Amino acid sequence: MKVTTIGTGYVGLVTGACLAEMGNHVVCLDVNPEKIRVLNEGGIPIHEPGLDSVVARNVAAGRLQFTTDVDAAVNHGTILFIAVGTPPGEDGSADLQYVLAAARSIGQRMTDYKVIVDKSTVPVGTAEKVNAAIREELDKRGATATYSVVSNPEFLKEGAAVDDFMKPDRIVVGSDDEQATLMMRALYAPFTRSHDRLMVMDVKSAEFTKYAANAMLATRISFMNELALLAEKVGADIELVRRGIGSDPRIGYQFLYAGAGYGGSCFPKDVKALVRTGREYGQDLKVLNAVEDANDRQKLVLVDKVVARFGEDLAGKRFAVWGLAFKPNTDDMREAPSLTIIEELTRRGAAIAAYDPVAMSEASKVLSANPGVSFCERAEHALPDADALVIVTEWKEFRTPDFDRIKAELKQPVVFDGRNLYEPTLMKALGIEHHAIGRGT
Ligand code: NAD
Ligand code: UGA
């Protein structure tokens, strides 16, 4: 099939590359010429494990192309994915300007039947707006081309995006149109060979499903983070509690890790947007309001622990910070808890020696205005003369560090373990002062 992705970011690029991998001919369009230049020169603008080889293979096979040429891109695809950003507006609602601009650019050019797929995360009712925007553009030029708008939200996780796309738990298609449904079924057939994972539902339910999924996952995390705070007070260990409840199949083990708060380009904005939708319809979403508040507080928990140990005034203190990206295996810094933590520590006068295995370049862009931050090429280079080590992101390489070196290089052996990487008993045996999350240490 001929497919176009409008937007070549995390979702558009992964979608385009994985659909090309299944034999489709895909054109990925972006308004950012720099992104397209990098891709056309064989680079990948984001860090996403496994994506480079899928892209390279399909470019070489002539099935995957990148362009800024809107005419060519709209003309190419029979199925057009809209995969542009939906950032939070000032009131927390999803800003649909990029989605609707993409819809208009389709309406201004299309001449034959198209299936237009909302892949971006968008509030209930957006497909109708996309439909109206296209219709308006067609009417303006008196064109009669037919089209269907379907919703196909994406559930991939950064850091595992290619795997998630190639082996989806489910593929949700919101469609009220039989022809479009058949085409979406055909497009996704190679991804559902072992059993049918494709669920067809009405458009609004599909749009809602995406927010419900992210809101549920964010709720689990905030719930565990809140219990972790209480666990510390009552003397329980949240890690043992996590295992104790996760073993119940009704609860399950995933997304129950207490930590330094959730970040990223999706949970924070999607929780906000759903709360906002609730408000719009006069429905106060009390649980989700609390989820957001709890996460804002959680991002400060490591700072509170540092202050409790070293005092409110951190002038003259230096901290090694390991892990800057919002989660491991990505260079994405959007809404990363590390940003809040570093800002709060430097605001109190501390100096930061920061390290991340892949997000250093992205981090230095967002932290460039903060003179209190220096970047280190290796994790251990951040340690000398630091008063403590603060771990914010659980990269694998931090799991088994050289503890003797940590002890020798820090001014005193103090570790703030924001992702519960280390066992308190081991830290005690090593003589390291260990401040974890919800573990009574
Ligand atoms: P992104 O910022 O990485 O990429 C969006 C791209 O769209 C940018 O490159 C931008 O230049 C481009 N763009 C904007 N307007 C355009 C236009 N009119 N024509 C062509 N290109 C245009 O965003 P993302 O992380 O890929 O997210 C896209 C959407 O998918 C969001 O709604 C997000 O919530 C959702 N989503 C993201 C993820 C994720 O892991 N990042 C997962 C599931 C869903
Ligand atoms: C999340 C969802 O997991 C995807 O299904 C969804 O498609 C995507 O949002 C989206 O809509 O964009 P992502 O943001 O890439 O994916 O990353 P997650 O692995 O979900 O992690 C999000 C945040 O939660 C991270 O900061 C992570 O550290 C934190 N987290 C995750 C915890 O604190 N505890 C956990 O147990 C799990």
Image (cartoon, helix red, strand yellow):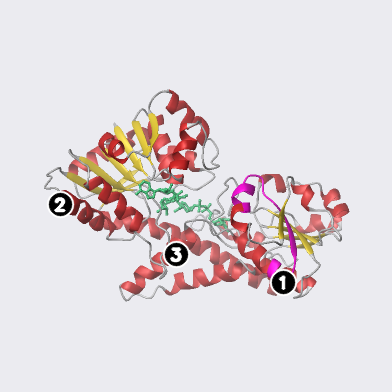
Q: Quadrant of the C terminus?
A: bottom right
Q: Looking at the picture, which amino acid does disc 2 mark?
A: Lys
Q: Earlier in the sequence, mark 2 or mark 3?
A: 2
How many numbered marks does the figure carry? 3
Where disc 2 sits, the SS reads helix
Q: Which residues are magenta?
A: 346-364
364 and 262: which is toward the camera: 364
The residue to which callout 1 is attached is: 348
| Nearest-to-viewer mark from 1 and 2 | 2
Give the number of the disc on residue 140.
Answer: 2
User: In which quadrant of the rendered image does the N terminus lie?
Assistant: top left
Tell me where residue 369 sits by quadrant: bottom right
| Relative image position of residue 303 (x, y in whole percent) | 69, 68
Inter-mark Cα distance, 3 to 1 = 30 Å
Q: Earlier in the sequence, mark 1 or mark 2?
A: 2
Q: Choose between 134 and 157: the one closer to the eye.
A: 134
Is residue 191 found left or right of 45 in the rendered image? Answer: left
| Eye-nearest disc, 3 or 1 | 1
Residue found farthest to the top: 61
Report the mark closest to the observer, 2 or 3. 2
Disc 3 crowd rating (10 Å Cα; few below 14, some 14-19, many 20+) is many
Say which amino acid is labelled 3.
Answer: Val
- Please say if 277 is above or below 378: below
Cα separation, mark 2 vs mark 3, equals 37 Å
Q: Residues within 10 Å of mark 2 (few under 14, many from 20)?
A: few
Q: Residue at x 67, y 63 (%)?
A: 342
Q: Are marks 2 and 3 in contact (CB under 8 Å)?
A: no
Labelled disc at residue 271: 3
Residue 263: image quadrant is bottom right
Please give the name of the residue rendered at 49% of the width and 43% of the height, measured from the top-left corner.
161
Q: Return the x and y of residue 101 as percentages of the image width and height.
A: 30, 53
